Amino acid sequence: MGVSLEEIKAAFSTLPDKRTPTTKDWQRLSSVWQEDLNRRIAKMEKLRDLISGCIGCGCLSMSKCPIYNEDDKLSIEGSGPILLDRE
């Protein structure tokens, strides 16, 4: 769901004596991931809302894209969904 097993393993490695996390431990450990998860959720919501239109990926396959990205001018900002990545 967005937190890798490697990240969880690293978090658990901070526990004394490799013990099972308590509720308090888990609250502390999981707080590290909350901001990142909120950022990912916001990006997914934006994708959901924009998925039927141009997200600036450079494909230029939609008739609506030239309005936003004529001749792929956004490519100077890098590859991928440039409009989606803007805050």
Image (spheres, rainbow, N blue to C red):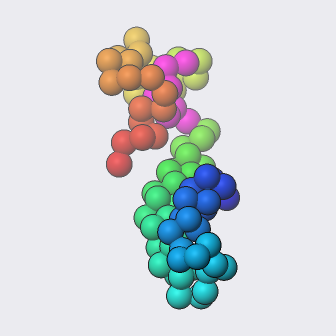
Quarter the N terminus occupies: bottom right
In the image, residue 39 sits, relative to residue 28, either above or below, namely: above
Where residue 35 appears, x then y in whole percent? 43, 64
Where residue 81 appears, x then y in whole percent? 48, 32
Q: Main secondary structure of the magenta part?
A: loop
Is residue 34 or residue 23 the one in the foreground?
23
Would residue 64 be visible to someone looking at this image?
A: yes
Is residue 31 or residue 56 the one in the foreground?
31
Q: Residue at x 66, y 79 (%)?
A: 20
- Count of residue discs: 0
Q: Residue at x 59, y 88 (%)?
A: 23
In magenta stretch: residue 23? no
Where residue 21 appears, x then y in whole percent? 61, 80
Q: Residue at x 56, y 51 (%)?
A: 44
In the image, residue 42 sits, relative to residue 62, either above or below, namely: below
Q: Which residues are magenta?
A: 53-59
In magenta stretch: residue 58? yes
Q: Residue at x 61, y 86 (%)?
A: 22
Is residue 15 or residue 67 the one in the foreground?
15
Is residue 67 or residue 78 the one in the foreground?
78
Query: Within the image, what quadrant is residue 12 found in?
Result: bottom right
In the image, residue 10 sits, relative to residue 64, either above or below, namely: below
Where residue 10 appears, x then y in whole percent? 55, 59
Would residue 49 be visible to someone looking at this image?
A: no
In the image, residue 44 sits, relative to residue 68, either above or below, namely: below
Residue extending farthest to the top is: 71
